[in-house]
Each structure stands twice: as structure tokens, then as C-alpha cells.
Image (tube, rainbow, N blue to C red):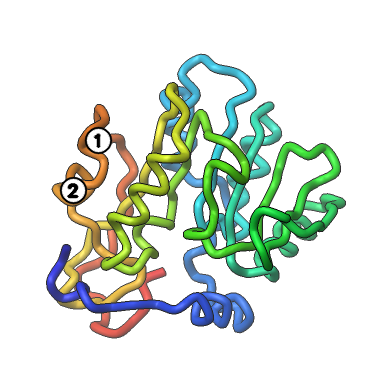
Amino acid sequence: MVEQQADRTMELSEWEERWQENKIGFHQLEVNRMLQVNYDSVVNGRSGVRFFFPLCGKAVDMKWLADLGHSVVGVEISEKAIKQFFQENNMTYSEEPVPSLPGARLFQNSEKNISLYQSDLFSFSSSVAGQFGAIWDRGSLVAINPKDRERYAALIISLMAADCRYLLDTLLYNPSLYKGPPFFVPDEQVHGLFGEFQLQHRPGNTLIPATGPAGGDPG
């Protein structure tokens, strides 16, 4: 864990506030380049792969994958983000409670190949929606409070099916100049969290200029 960020925390209410105030510089309007470049490696010849999106926001990647014939399950704390996803992609959707997750709501498009749970991620488990053949972690590990990373990794591993492929995007910057989030997660910690699996470095790490302001938001 990076010493400069070890004690930094973000409450769920702060993330919801960012969505309410439209402070969502982390949201991308186009399909993520890293996902496109590594798509074949993640799918690995499979069709109809179940993808999991932790802290999914309103990522356009979800529709892109669904249009390619896959199904998507996401978890997001912000109801606004989830509803905007469906509205901005001109999808009709249903909303219902989740008996196994008190207080959570499940939003699904009419084709039911995109299912988004409004819930605390740490309340989610494989007992809710099973395991997955692929996980796309574009802004989740780097958003999780540093002290919760081991807990997060244990959850992600528990959601992996036997043939699961996990695509992780991390960020490269000087943590002494920015307190996060997004947080800096060194490669050695990624190996420590997921080292029991075969890890491959793939192209696509996000670079944040080292000259950024100490308290600013690079996202």
C-alpha cells in the first residue's frame, strides 16, 4: 500500500454526491480503448460470456458488450448513474427489489442481458447473481479505499468462474502529488492480491501527468 494514500477514505455518500453534482470526470463517453484492444484475449473464443462490472457507473462499455452478444451484470451505488445509463442508451428498463440484498434494487433492460444492481459492492456476492466468465475492472480497484483492497480482491476472486478472465486497468502517477481517488495501486500489490492466478501485463495503463495539483482530481 502506498504510504501517502494509506489512510485516505471515500464514503459511499461522497460517491453518490459526485454523481448528483455531475462531478464524474472518470466517466468516458466512448468505449474504453483498453477493453477494445484486449477484447479477443478476454473473450478467448467464447460466445455469450457473462461480464461483471464492479462499480459500473454508466459505462458505455456495457452496451457495447451486450451488442456483441454477451450479458452484463454491474453493481453501482448511485441510482442516478444506473438510470442515466438506460436513458442515455434509449433502453426501456424494469426496476425491482432484490430479496437477498435488503435495500438494493435491480434494474434490467427489456432484453434482460444488462442487469445493474444498485447496492454497496461489498454486500454483493455470488449467491446473488452467480459467477462470471469475465470481469472488466476499469475504475473499481483504483476507487476502493486502500484499506479495503484485500477484502475487495477476495470478493472479486469469489465471483470468478473457472474460466474467468479478469481485465484490470490501473493508473500510473506520482502518489505524493495527488491523494486520490483514483488511487495508485503498484504492480507488486496487484500481484500480492491476485498472485495465485496467471497474470499478464496488457497494454492500456492510464497515465496521469506527474505535474498535476496535489489536491486535484485527475479524472
100 vs 48, nearest the viewer? 100
Mark number, residue 193? none
| Residue 181 pos. (x, y %) | 35, 71
11 vs 89, nearest the viewer? 11
* Residue beneath the point at 61% across and 19% down: 47
Q: Quadrant of the C terminus?
A: bottom left
What element does badge 2 sit on?
A: helix
Looking at the rendered structure, the kind of residue marked 2 is Asp
* Residue beneath the point at 18% across and 51% down: 189
Mark with earlier residue (1, 2)? 2
219 vs 44, nearest the viewer? 44
- Which circle, 1 or 2, is nearer the viewer? 2
| Residue 196 pos. (x, y %) | 23, 33
| Residue 90 pos. (x, y %) | 82, 53
Q: Is residue 62 above or below residue 185?
A: above
CA gap, disc 1 to disc 2?
9 Å
Residue placed farthest to the top in the image? 45
Q: Is residue 32 left or right of residue 119?
A: left
Which residue is labeled 2 in the image? Answer: 187
Q: Quadrant of the N terminus?
A: bottom left
* Residue beneath the point at 61% across and 45% down: 128
- Are the residues at dot 1 and dot 2 in contact (C-beta closer than 8 Å)? yes
Looking at the rendered structure, the kind of residue marked 1 is His
Pointer 1 local density, CA inside 10 Å: few below 14, some 14–19, many at least 20: few
Q: Is residue 23 above or below residue 210?
A: below
1 vs 155, nearest the viewer? 155
Mark number, residue 201? 1
Q: Is residue 7 above or below residue 172?
A: below
